[in-house]
Image (cartoon, rainbow, N blue to C red):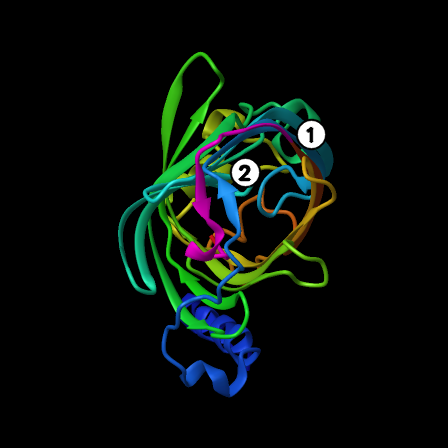
Amino acid sequence: MTRPPPSPLRRLALAAALVLSAAGPALGQTEAAPPARAQERLPLLEMGILGGGGYVPDYPGAAQSRLRGIVSPSITYRGELLRADEFGARLRAWRDGGVEFSFSASGSFPVSSRENRAREGMPDLDWMGEIGPTLRITLWRDPAAPRRVMLETPVRAVFSTDLSNMRFRGWVFNPDIAWEQRDLLIPRSRFRIGLGVVLANERFMDYFYGVAPEFARPDRPAYRARGGYLGTRLQFSYRVPVTEHLSLIAGARFENFAGATNADSPLFRRDFNVSVAAGFSWTLYRSTDTVAATADPLE
C-alpha cells in the first residue's frame, strides 16, 4: 500500500525539528541581549552598487534552468523602523523583545516562453514582485555569541509586470525556520540557512501551471491549477566583507516538489530544482550619521 505524502504542516514540523536540533539544549534559554561589540558604530545609510548572477530554474518545477544576472544600485539603511540591505528590505511596524511584525518584499526574473520547451507558444512569465506582512520570532539566541534561531511567517501578495502594466497574481505563504550567525569563520560575515514550505492560492498556482484551452496541444492538455502545497525549500546565504568597501555574497537553494498539489500539470516537469548564485556589493557612500553596532549584530 502506498503511503500518502506528508502534509504541509508535518513537513514544516520536520523542518523545525531539523533546525532546532542544531541548537541543542540551549533552546530552553530565554531571549537574551546580544553581546556588546566594543563601542563599534556603523553608518546609518550606505549606498553603492550591487551585482550578481546565478543559475536558476525558469519557474518552480521547471525542467530548464539558465544563467541570469543583474546590476543595480544598492542601499543599506539601519533605521529603527526601516531596514534594508542586499538581502532585502523590511518595514518594522512593531517589535517587542524577540517578536517583530514587519513588511517585506522580494522579486524574481521574467521567463520567455520561446526559450522554455514546456511553455512554447504560451504567454511569457513576467517580472514578479512580492510584498506583505511577516511575523518574525526569535526562538533562541546565544547570550555569548551573535547567533540565533528564527521563525519567519511571510504572507505576500504577488504581482507581475511587463513594465507596461501590472497584474495581481495571488498570495503566497512561506513559513521558514532558520539559523542565523555573524562572524562565522570570518569577522563581520553573515550566514543564514533556512528550511521551510511554500503554500499558495489557486490564482498564483494557475499563473505557473495552468494551461488555457487555446494553448493546449497533444503533449500539453488544458489544465486548471489548484491552490495548496507547492514545495519545500532549503536555502542558505553567506556574506563576507573583503575590504572596507567590497563584500562578496554567495547562496544556494534546494527545492523539493514531491507531493505538490499541481504535480499533474503538463508544465510541472521536475520534482527537484537547484539554484546557485554569487554576487558583490560595492559601497560608494557612507553617511556621517551612525548607529550602534551593539543594537543587534544580527540585524
Quadrant where the N terminus is found in the figure = bottom right
**In this view, 137 is above or below 166:** below
Q: Which residues, given as a range, are shown in magenta?
A: 283-298
Q: Position of residue 130 (x, y in %)?
A: 42, 37
On the question of residue 106 being in view, the answer is: yes
- Can you tell which quarter of the image residue 183 is in? bottom right
Q: Position of residue 288 (x, y in %)?
A: 48, 31
**The stretch drawn in magenta includes residue 284:** yes
Q: Which of 2 and 89 lies nearest the eye of the viewer?
A: 89
Q: Amino acid at mark 2?
A: Pro
- Please identify the residue farthest to the front as the structure is shown: 39
Q: Amino acid at mark 1?
A: Gly
Measure how far apart labels 1 and 2 are at the Cα level.
Answer: 33 Å
**In this view, 38 is above or below 106:** below
Q: Which of 131 and 287 lies nearest the eye of the viewer?
A: 287
Q: Position of residue 178 (x, y in %)?
A: 51, 64
Q: Check disc 1 and report the residue beneath it.
A: 69
Q: Secondary structure at mark 2?
A: loop
**In this view, 172 is above or below 296:** above
User: Residue at coordinates 37% horizontally, 57% vertically from top-left?
Assistant: 153
Q: Which mark is residue 204?
A: none
Q: Which of 263 and 134 lies nearest the eye of the viewer?
A: 134
Sequence order check: which comes first, mark 1 or mark 2? 1
Q: Which mark is residue 221?
A: 2
Q: Residues within 10 Å of mark 2 (few under 14, many from 20)?
A: some
On the question of residue 55 being in view, the answer is: no
**The stretch drawn in magenta includes residue 44:** no
Q: Position of residue 101 (x, y in %)?
A: 29, 52
